[in-house]
Image: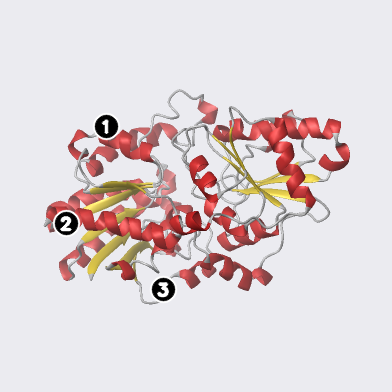
Amino acid sequence: MKKLLIISPYFPPVNAADMQRVRMSLPYFASFGWDAEVVMVDEAYTDIAKDDLLLQSVPPAVKVHKVKALKKRHTSKLGLGSIALRSLWFYRHKVSALLIANKYDLIYFSTTQFPVCILGAYWKKHFGVPYVIDMQDPWHSEYYQDKPKHQRPSKYWFSYRLNKYLEPIAMRSVDGLISVSANYVTNLKYRYPVIKDIPAATITFGAFDKDIQIADNNKHLFKSVLQSGYTNIVYIGRGGMDMHKAVIPVFNALQKGLKNQPGLYNGLKFYFIGTSYAAAGDGSPTILPLAQQFGLQEQVVEITDRISYYHTLLTLQQADGLFIPGSDDPSYTASKIYPYLLTQKPLLAIFNPASSAISVLKEYGAKHVYDYETITSEDIDRFILETTADSPIIQYNAEAIEKYSARQMTLNQCLLFDKVIDGKN
């Protein structure tokens, strides 16, 4: 059995999106020949919401090591809140000790807290252990460079320059890449020719059906955020100006529908939940202001605060229909699509024409999948009519369900790990 050391600063019970690949893969690594251990930042050092139910999906036999971090209340005075930067020294010390005491075949960084990835080059140099980086998002990106200041993330000036400096340290020595988008790998290999021949694979997140069971078993713990008496159509995930191109066609259709079929369209509520990464109560709405421009403030509800993962799954199940808007970034792929598909609810998805999510959803057999350049109000009307009729159970393609399952996605990761190891022997 080969030994895998996973670096995932956020890990259950922390409810962070970037630990989901690791969490959903842990039940399957051993069956594909890899004994996995995780090194996380102790949850006491993060202010992200906790969800203890997440621990029910982590196999008890998996060894989890915890590291400390500098306290945010101190570092924030210097403008440094990143868990990656606050834990960097502690990660270096802890993992170095593990590498001295144990033999590991591979280190796997699966996180969007990218600064920790620079330690891969350090550990490779001092201990000879190869490493793989999972690119769930771009690290250094030019995407916001031509955007107005109000559309840029907070502290963009600092993060842009830090990422531009740190990314080369990690990438020039990396032994393998996994990415949710083929474009991410293409861009990195172009930027760093020295890695053009290393193993790389595009692997989306997988559908983990055990989560639906955990959510259902604990539904008594959660209060519904949806209003009764309406046809509720739900999106749960981040908002942002980059999603407006996908949202505008829906708001156009709603505006027309209220004028032409008020009896039907007055009974609709579109929910956008958990749209901000800010602390609870501090988020700024990015969808409701757009809805107000269309006069849709009665039909659109935006809740900027995030809800827990299993509360999310239950809310998706309680909805009459689901909506997934994509970013205008062509590299964007919505890893969140799999929990939506597991509910078997009517689904409307609108993406950039180049997004890989379109082909995945069509493989499943999802009916209402469009790009924002060609979608029409009539397309959206058909989705609404289907949703308001009986909220039917949707049957998806069995081959696609297996192809994009968490088990298969874990196998794909392990095949890449094997290539990396074989190339070093």
Q: Position of residue 154 (x, y in %)?
A: 49, 37
Res 67 visible: no
- Exactly how many numbered labels are in the figure? 3
Mark 2 and mark 1 in contact (Cβ < 8 Å)?
no
Residue 190 is tagged as: 1
Q: CA distance from mark 3 to mark 1?
A: 39 Å
The residue indicated by pointer 3 is: 59
Q: What residue appears at the point 46 percent right and 59 percent down from the top-left corner?
A: 402
Mark 2 and mark 3 in contact (Cβ < 8 Å)?
no
Residue type, mark 3 in image: Pro
Residue 422 is tagged as: 2
Residue type, mark 2 in image: Asp
Q: Name the quadrant of the N terminus.
A: bottom left
Q: Name the quadrant of the C terminus.
A: bottom left
Q: Position of residue 298 (x, y in %)?
A: 80, 40
Residue 275 is tagged as: none
* 80 and 283: which is toward the camera: 283
Q: Position of residue 256 (x, y in %)?
A: 79, 30
